Image: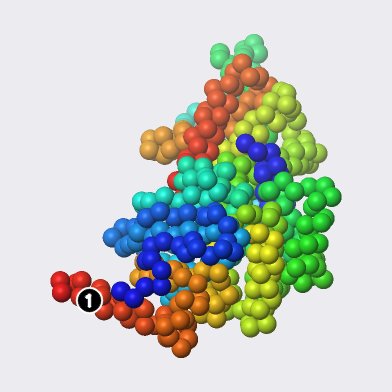
Amino acid sequence: MPGYGNDCSGNTDSPLLGTPLVQLEDVSKHFGLIEAVSHVSLQVESGSIFGLVGSDGAGKSTLLRMVATMIKPSSGKIVIDGLDVMSQKMRVKPLIGYMPQRFGLYQDLTVGENIDFFMDIFGIFGAERGKRRERYLGFSNLLPFVDRLAGALSGGMKQKLGLACVLVHQPKVLILDEPTNGVDPVSRQEFWDILGEMRQGGMTILISTAYLDEGEKCDHMGLMHKSRILGIANPEEFRSHYPNLEEAMIHRIKEVDEGLIYDRFGL
Amino acid sequence: MNLINIKAVSRKEFYHLIRDFRSMYLAFIIPLLLILMFGYALSLDVDNVKTMVVDHDRTELSRDFIRKLDASSYFKVIYHLRDTVAAIRYLDQGSTTMAVVIPPGWTEDIKADREAQMQVLLDGSDPNFASLSRGYITAFVEAYNRDRFIDFLNRSGKERIEPPVDGRIRVWFNEDLESQNFIVPGIIAIIIMIVGAMLTSLVIAREYENGTMETVRSLPIRGGEFLIGKAIPYFLIALTDVLVAVFMGQVLFGVVMKSSFWLMVLASTIYISVALSLGLLISIATKSQLVANQIAILVTFLPSMLLSNFVFPVENMPKVFQLLTYIVPATYFIDILNGLYLRGLGLDHLWPSYLVLVGMLVVLSNIGFAILKKEGM
């Protein structure tokens, strides 16, 4: 197979990036007979953005939910900052900020009350509380809407509030599941600008997306298809053999699908 | 247990509560309405039974009997009719519930020392009411007989004779047999179930439906902290409702507690916690507000009303239902409140009921914790 790096390992030779902060070793997840995630191994270096790209139903959400301690892997091991996600869940949770695909904000609470709830849980009080509120609501241009009910925000603003809520405890690892799905292009750009700034500040980001142009903004991309990671590389490497990223992806997916058919017929 | 987490969840839940009109209505308006409705309208006492009389005899004696009947506080003669056909028509219409028919020759029979028969027609469609009416009219006729008997003996020259056995009835604990004394504890039990279980049955289902449960689960907060934090605002509301009900019972209905106020508060605290655990458990298990609400009515409100010895006496129920009453928390709470309110009992007599409630609390809350834990919280 023409590869873009190894099937199951991260690109570790980039000089810009630090040590692996998130490590997945041979992680699988079954729901009954269905294998949602199959033998995934990957590493996310400290201070980098790792993008999981793939179509709907590829297993991206399941993979991210396992990293975010939400569900237990059927097999394999996930380590974040040296802590095992399964056995040290309560110690891992403060390190991560997880924004699910359908991020549940409290619609009947105001913008300020929503972010206060997160600060309450993470024990951010005193002078720091006001500072963080300013900073993260400021980032997302939500300060003028502090007293507005979250339910009355636009879709893009809701996503930015969600991001502010998961950022407010300044996690080491940010896990975002298709955060810009259905968001207008301007808000998407703003959203990515915030992520860029966070990365500058040393945050590690694991994000899934169905948009290839967003994949381009990542330091590494993992192409996920039919519950497996087909390849991990940086966007330039993916692009190097093909005129654009889209063709590269489609070609790679076709290749694998054909491979699966051969497998099935024992050829 | 992390108190900061509990406080954070409580505060958030409090905001939900004050912004939700339906919850506020259930929490404060319904309890007030229940107290007023049960206290005033649903009096379980029977007096002034609407009575018709058909006097075929038309003598002085029969008129005297009817006068005495009307003068008693239990009966109110509203129709004097010519024949039973009319009486039956009024019974059919439901405008009265009892008819007394005095046949012709009644006085003659009495004077001739023959058995003088008299017919009483009762509307049995409300059995409770009918059996009370029957008791009253039977007692009334007996008293009338006794008066006549003594009168006869006295007039026939004997010394004043007292009847050989004179049963003097004294009612204990609720001397005036006022049903309000019994209703106030029952209302408190039902209000707690409404506020405690029916309101809280919605709160976790709401988190699942709005997708906020996923958010909460990603936070460093344990299932126990989450549940306790959720329960606290509802606990405070339920306790407020109890105090309001006790106060209103005293002011409006003159129902005064004979035993310790603090024992009542203790019992209420435990019972509220049972109701909250039950509501939260329903919420966790169903994950849907609509289903949770239906189930909450079915397993909390209705049994508290029907199977708790409140409105319907347990002794009259079939065996199966009698056994069911043992698993209804309200049964034990009403038992405690009656003990405290009417009988002036203390913990030395009431501890078994307290203990059962504590047991229920432990079981229900642990099932709730276990389910949340299984869901990865």
Position of the C terminus of chain A, as image quadrant, is: bottom left
Q: Is residue A235 left or right of residue B346?
A: left
Give the residue at x 36% y 51%.
A75
- Image position of A128 with respect to B209: above or below: above
- Image position of B373 with respect to A147: above or below: above
Query: Residue B258: x percent and y percent?
Result: 73, 24
Give the residue at x 82% y 47%.
A126
Query: Residue B287: x percent and y percent?
Result: 50, 57
Query: Residue A45: x percent and y percent?
Result: 54, 59
Camera-side residue: A89 or A81? Answer: A81
Res B240 visible: yes
Give the residue at x 60% y 46%.
B221
Three-letter code, disc 1: Ile
Question: Mark 1: few, some, or many residues within 10 Å (few <14, many ≥20)?
Answer: few
Label 1: state its secondary structure: helix
- Image position of B248 with respect to B123: above or below: above
Q: Residue furthest bottom?
A: A243
Res B81 visible: no
Query: Residue A1: x percent and y percent?
Result: 30, 74
* Picture quadrant of residue B64: top right
Camera-side residue: A251 or A89? Answer: A251
Q: Is residue A170 left or right of residue B58?
A: right
* Picture quadrant of residue B157: top right
Q: Residue furthest top?
A: B159
* Picture quadrant of residue A251: bottom left
Residue highlighted by disc 1? A261
Give the residue at x 44% y 60%.
A42
**How many numbered callouts?**
1
Q: Residue furthest left?
A: A266
Camera-side residue: A135 or B55? Answer: A135
